[in-house]
Amino acid sequence: MKSLEQLTRPNIWSLAPYSSARNEYSGKVARVFLDANENPYNAPYNRYPDPLQEELKKAISNIKGVPAGNIFLGNGSDEAIDLPYRCFCRPDIDNVVAIEPTYGMYKVCADINEVEYRPVQLDEQYQMNADKLLVACDDNTKLIWLCSPNNPTGNSLNRDEILRVIEHFEGIVIVDEAYSDFSRQKSLRSELQKYPNLIILNTMSKAWGCAAIRLGMAFASADIIALFNKVKYPYNVNLLTQQKAMEAIANRIDVEKWIGLLLQERTHLMESFAMLPICEKVYPSDANFFLARMTNAQAIYDYLVDKGIIVRNRSRIQLCNNCLRVTIGTRSENSELLGALRQYE
Ligand SMILES: *Cc1c(COP(=O)(O)O)cnc(C)c1O
């Protein structure tokens, strides 16, 4: 790996970050707070929230087995996807490499930040080849984007290939594990100590059932976390989100229950799809959705919309010709979908 200083944009490396009142005095023992121009009325919403979300990070640290100092929390994973561009990629000079197909936000953020995006096609089984990714890199490649289990394909990437990329790439490898709670594959979080160029993304939007509160996580070296903290908005995770996330963690027995139910439903729905005459192939899934190749994805999509059932049409995506992406719902939602598809002609 190149040094973090070599990888970081010079303006970010030398940035003097905004120092908020809550940064300068973060003790809890004081009684009178007249430092942040807050309104003394309307507690608790009158006070700025903890800019570094220490209490929440401690709770997440316990669950995820990663020290609090190696955790960044953001306004959804979206923030943790945008920050690496802002920290590492010089507009119009640097580039990033990513698997293709994958989650659309990596490219959108590249475009917003004026950074060249180099997609590298997966093979027919939606697996990646480390050498193919590394060959696409040059001296200005700062980031490699991987997603496992991948969206929209649903499969996990081969762990040895991921590790080969991390070991041979000079820059930073980001592995988005948004769906790892649904997978039996081991998370790469256990490898963080070993690889200072690894960033792992998680979210509360999927298995945790909290898409509305917008809480995303990045796990990385303390130095990368410090860079993110320097660049992020000072109060990027609001009080309501921090409170709801604490509640979700306290009730995590529910999350385990949901995951169990959804995995059971996934098996049932995938098997039922495989038997539909209009379904040509069901791709293996490690997530709470799966990809199915249909006889005519667009027509079937339109037919379902007409019945008030919305799936995702991924037909126009590379390697996903005629594919629909189906999220696992409740038993009754899944039955409605199957009932409609059985009547399709
Ligand atoms: C859904 C999803 C996310 C979640 O994004 P949030 O901003 O945390 O809601 C992240 N990565 C992938 C690949 C996803 O599919």
Image (cartoon, rainbow, N blue to C red):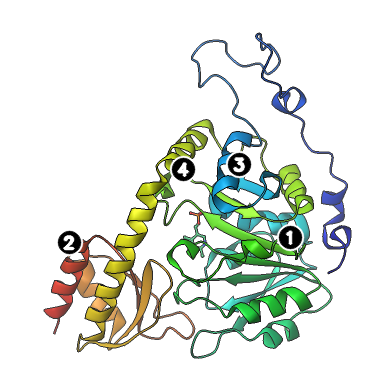
Res 128 quadrant in image: bottom right
Residue assigned mark 1: 193
- Identity, as a three-letter code, of the amino acid under mark 2: Ser
Q: Residues within 10 Å of mark 3 (few under 14, many from 20)?
A: many
Whichever of callouts 4 and 2 sits on the residue coming sooner in the sequence is 4
SS assignment at label 1: loop
Q: Are marks 1 and 2 in contact (CB under 8 Å)?
A: no
Q: Residue at x 59, y 28 (%)?
A: 49
Whichever of callouts 1 and 4 sits on the residue coming sooner in the sequence is 1
Whichever of callouts 2 and 3 sits on the residue coming sooner in the sequence is 3
Q: Residue at x 74, y 86 (%)?
A: 135
Q: Is the CB of mark 1 within 8 Å of ligand 1?
A: no
Residue assigned mark 3: 57
In this view, the mark in front (1 or 2): 1
Q: Residues within 10 Å of mark 1 (few under 14, many from 20)?
A: few
- Identity, as a three-letter code, of the amino acid under mark 3: Lys
Q: Distance between the Cα atoms at labels 1 and 4?
A: 25 Å
